[in-house]
Amino acid sequence: MMVSKEALFEQMVSLIASAHQLHYDMTKGLPMDDITPLQYEILEFLSVKQPITLSQLSECMGISMPNTSREIKKLTDKGLCEKIDDTEDRRKQYIRLSAGGEARMAESFAHMRGLFMQQVNDVSDTELAHISEAIKVLKSTLLRD
């Protein structure tokens, strides 16, 4: 079956919107307590891409450098992330989750895992394999990993 690139683009836009909705649905019940939604997004991003420089984080999240720096300072003050110096270039620092941040994200992912398992409860093994393969294809062709 031939698919035009224009039709594929429209499917991709729809997928992105659906992914945002899925993310919202999976995180809306999370206790945020002392952090903002933006700070949570930073912690979530760090949990998959760390260590990362402040400028890389700023670019990937689409946040200005001053705002990124301010949010990282707040998260560091709360004991959820930490800065580490580059061993080769002392001017460069990396950001990573602290032990407290790792624990916080483990709780969040446990909550999301429960919701995900409910969603895929009735999905057949064949469909799960197709979903897994589709994700691999997306990651290898369109998504930055």
Image (cartoon, rainbow, N blue to C red):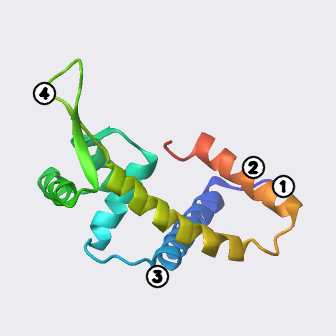
- Marks 3 and 4, the one that precedes in the sequence: 3
Real-space Cα separation, disc 3 to disc 2, in angstroms? 29 Å
Question: Are the residues at dot 3 and dot 1 in contact (C-beta closer than 8 Å)?
Answer: no
Do we see residue 23 in this rendering?
A: yes
- The residue carrying mark 3 is 29
Real-space Cα separation, disc 3 to disc 1, in angstroms? 41 Å
Foreground residue among 29 and 38? 29
* Other residues around mark 4 within 10 Å, as few (<14) / some (14–19) / many (≥20): few
- Marks 1 and 2, the one that precedes in the sequence: 1
Label 1 SS: loop
Q: Quadrant of residue 128?
A: bottom right
Label 2 SS: helix
The amino acid pointed to by label 1 is Met
Q: Quadrant of residue 45?
A: bottom left
- The residue carrying mark 2 is 133
Which one is in front in this view, the residue at disc 2 or the one at disc 4?
4
Q: Which residue is located at x 70 percent, y 75 percent?
A: 119
Give the quadrant of the N terminus: bottom right
Q: Is residue 135 above or below residue 83?
A: below
The amino acid pointed to by label 3 is Gly
Question: Are the residues at dot 1 and dot 2 in contact (C-beta closer than 8 Å)?
Answer: no
Label 4 SS: loop
Indicate the position of residue 92 as horizontal and vertical percent values: 18, 30
- Marks 4 and 1, the one that precedes in the sequence: 1
Q: Which residue is located at x 56 percent, y 46 percent?
A: 142
Position of 69 compared to 111: left or right? left
